[in-house]
Amino acid sequence: MTQSALTAAAVAYVSSLTPKQVNDALTDEDITTVAPVQFRPRMSRAGEDTSSVGPTVQMRAIYTSQWFWEIAAECPNNRIWWGGKETDLDKRREGAPLHFPDYLMLFLVCLAGVKGVGTINAAATLLRDEKVWRDLVEHMDTYVPEEWTKLGDLPQRNPKRTPKHATLATPGTEPTDRTRPLQPTKKKAKRKRKGNVTQLRPRNERPLTAPPSPNTLDYWVLKWRGYRRSSAGRVRLEPGHEYYGLQARVMAKFRETALAQAQAMGVLDSTANFVYNQPDRNQYVGFDGVVFKAPRKGRLSTVGTYMTGTGEAARGTKYGITSTRVNGQRHSRVILDFAHIHKSLDGSYRGESPMVEATLPGMREATNGGIKGLLVDSVIRGRAVEHLQRHGVTVINYPHAKTNPKGGAGRRLAEGRVEKTHLRHAVSHLNDFHINCEHHVFAVGGELMEAVFTGEGTYALTPLPVVKYEQRGKATNGTRREYLTVKITCPHTRNDLTERIALFHTPATSNDPNYIWGEVCRVYPPGSWQAKYLYGARNDTEARHADLKARVQHLPGDRDGQMLRLLGASIANNAFSWQVHLQAHGLDNVVDDTA
């Protein structure tokens, strides 16, 4: 861009403005008085989970969700037949025989991700309860897809060698006259016993098989990690093995079903338009990184040291997580995706920004344009913002400051913050006196502002009202271009001027300067009520982190094991959200025990 003398003077004066002069000029709307009632901010979701239901309700939510069964269908052995046939259960294979179908193994992982359970051992212990196991079999079998093996049809394994009930104690004293159980007010019929096993149900006049133990899951998890046992020890699965690529298939299906569930709940609606003046939180997803505690012992490749949102260093394993929710509806969070982040581990994303750039455009395409925007912190900046905007994802965050000496946790807008500023566009026109006028539009901390000559030999910044937002091109191939039309008031012209200004690209036919516009431009000025309203929904990511940490008490040291545990917790979370959503609409659900 060839600068005129006036343009050069405007740039020089704006560069000389003090931080206070710039900050005082920025828009700072009071959302409670500007926003319509339906768009006012709601309470933080940080305490939403205090009303969670018990583990058994959350357990039933898993297998009464159609999304769980779609994910389980990616596992190779869900059809295990019993009784005199050539079966998956009977066929010879390396390693331990299959005692349970794969869907039950996946269910056990999900059960370990239920809040109030939290570990594989706790999940297996819950199923050892005779009544819980019996009720689970009775209820879950009614949801098992056709042609899949039902739990009630599994053969009993070693009934004489394995007692049904664990012996927890041997008597240390003689019984007294008060050593007797409390009798129920209504006498119940005694259950028949066959050998040392209680006859739990009349199905085929056979007792149920014993519930799975934590060790039952070990070999299945080994195959999830991509290995098998052989005479030579643990070896990698070869292409063609029935479990080869299990993790990739299951994770892909999880991401697909999570987006499908979100849209079934009415969010990320592909038929809804993006309305600039009436932003809709239901069109946005939230992203943030979270650091889970690392195992105390050993040097692990998955572990690093990261700065948390409170400004403290935390050692652990980091994951980036994307989620959405129904605005204003409690317990509606749907986790859409998660992935490991490590700057030097092959197969992990090197940072939050690379993960977002790689995943969000594809997620938007998968929802047929239902994802309109992203709520994220300032980790997404510069070229990453431009990349997302070109692919149809509107970024809602605060641009990076030039300097922020008093910044830190909770002090993003601290006194002394200096916003990044760059000349964006120059407007030249003839005023009412037929004299050429120049108006200089600057991008300042995400807002378009004019440098106005004060008449005292100085310039001051003033926000430019937005009168129109436009999109051009296609987001599917990354060619979308965006523009804001702003109103400019000229003291020497009777009528206000309107000027269309590109946001995230430099038009080839313009005289605009070249710059990384993602550093200084945003669709919504950060101080506008629209940006404040949308960004307020990002509070949910902190509640999401706390919820996941409650669901996963201990992460394994390896990435594959961690992915499995977080998958189980995410499926359990989404399944419960689905049941609450059904309840909210008066449909059968496990919360009301009507499913």
Image (spheres, rainbow, N blue to C red):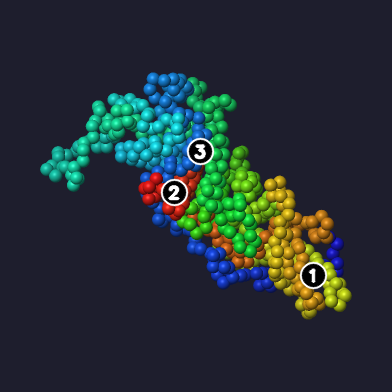
Whichever of callouts 3 and 1 sits on the residue coming sooner in the sequence is 3
Residue 579 disc label: 2
* Residue at screen point 11% across, 43% down: 177
- The correct choice, above or below, for 361 with respect to 19 in the image is above
* Residue at screen point 61% across, 38% down: 346
In front: 262, or 307?
A: 262
Please state which amino acid type lies under the numbered disc 3: Glu
Residue 439 disc label: 1
Please state which amino acid type lies under the numbered disc 2: Gln
**Mark 3 packing: few (<14 Cα in 10 Å), some, or many (20+)?**
some
Question: What residue did someone put label 3 on?
Answer: 70
As measured in the structure, the alpha-carbon distance from the residue carrying label 3 to the one carrying label 2 is 17 Å
* Residue at screen point 40% across, 56% down: 51
Q: Quadrant of the C terminus?
A: top left
- The correct choice, above or below, for 154 with respect to 557 in the image is above
- The correct choice, above or below, for 65 with respect to 273 in the image is above
Residue 69: x %, y % from top left: 48, 38
Q: Nearer the viewer, mark 3 or mark 1?
A: 3
Residue 222: x %, y % from top left: 49, 31
Residue 104: x %, y % from top left: 43, 35
Element on which disc 2 rests: helix
Residue 12 in view: no
As measured in the structure, the alpha-carbon distance from the residue carrying label 2 to the one carrying label 1 is 57 Å
**Mark 2 packing: few (<14 Cα in 10 Å), some, or many (20+)?**
many
Whichever of callouts 3 and 2 sits on the residue coming sooner in the sequence is 3
Element on which disc 1 rests: strand
Q: Quadrant of residue 444?
A: bottom right
Element on which disc 3 rests: helix
Q: Residue furthest right?
A: 434
